[in-house]
Amino acid sequence: MDESRLPVPLARVALRVIPESVLNRLTYLLIRRMQKIHPGLFQNLARLDAATVCIEPSDLPYRFVLKFGQGPTSLRTAPRAGYSCDAAVKGKLESLLNLLEGRIDSDMMFFSREIIITGDTAVVVALRNTLDREEIRLLDDISAMCGPVSNPARKVIVRVNKFMDHIKTSMKNAHERRYSRDADETAAKLECARLQEEIKALKFRLAKFEVRGKRMDASAL
């Protein structure tokens, strides 16, 4: 596991269970913290034309609304329907995080349909170009929110994610063993059925030989 990356499975679970009001408060604090860590990024965002971009993780029940340009940058949750925006970026949470942190070439993600853009693509291109000029590591930024206990908090996040990975691997291995056992049982049943058919065929042939032998004995008399 890359310990410099925000653990996606842990993030997905947290985003599902944290109440929306609490989540909005946390995103507000995260933006405030990121403004201190990445002042150049937010200065560049403020120079853009005012725009609203909906970020829609396909594996979460809601979307995020990002407002930037000609003023403060904000990020908050919103329902999947009933909210207008200039553009929308859709994809799995992991793909969206990779896009934000610049870990995967964004053009490749667009062409492979890992990320889908709707609305004004110029807005998304301007946002992407601005983000690409800054190195963002969400795990570092989120850990920094914890202040003096940022390092212990980071270690806890990494350990919890390792534990979740261990559980996931154990469940996967158990499923594979069960699948292998079921496959072996199925193969054994098919082999038994084949042998039974061969035995029936042999019995039929043996019966024909017995009838033929009796006829030969009768004709000899």
Image (cartoon, grey):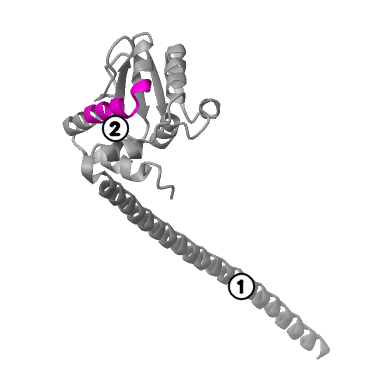
At 37% across and 11% down in the image, what residue appears?
A: 47
Residue occupying the far bottom of the picture: 221
Asked where in the image residue 124 lies, by quadrant, the reply is: top left
Q: Is residue 111 magenta?
A: no
Residue type, label 1: Leu
At 35% across and 36% down in the image, what residue appears?
A: 138
Query: Tag 2, which secondary structure?
Result: loop
Visible residue check, residue 145: yes
Q: CA distance from mark 1 to mark 2?
A: 53 Å
Asked where in the image residue 101 lies, by quadrant, the reply is: top left
Badges 1 and 2: C-beta atoms under 8 Å apart? no
| The C terminus - image quarter | bottom right
Residue type, label 2: Pro
Q: Is residue 35 magenta?
A: yes
Nearest to the observer: residue 146 or residue 194 = 146
Residue 66 as seen in the image, left or right of residue 183: left
Nearest to the observer: residue 110 or residue 212 = 110
Query: Tag 1, which secondary structure?
Result: helix
> Magenta stretch?
28-41
Location of mark 1 (residue): 195
- 155 relative to 181, above or below: above
- 162 relative to 7, above or below: below
Location of mark 2 (residue): 61
- 68 relative to 139, above or below: above
At 59% across and 72% down in the image, what residue appears?
A: 196
Residue occupying the far right of the picture: 220
Prevailing secondary structure class for the magenta stretch in the rendered image: helix
How many residues crowd mark 1 within 10 Å: few (<14), some (14–19), many (20+)? few
- 20 relative to 87, above or below: below
- Give the x, y percent position of residue 21: 17, 30
How many residues crowd mark 2 within 10 Å: few (<14), some (14–19), many (20+)? few
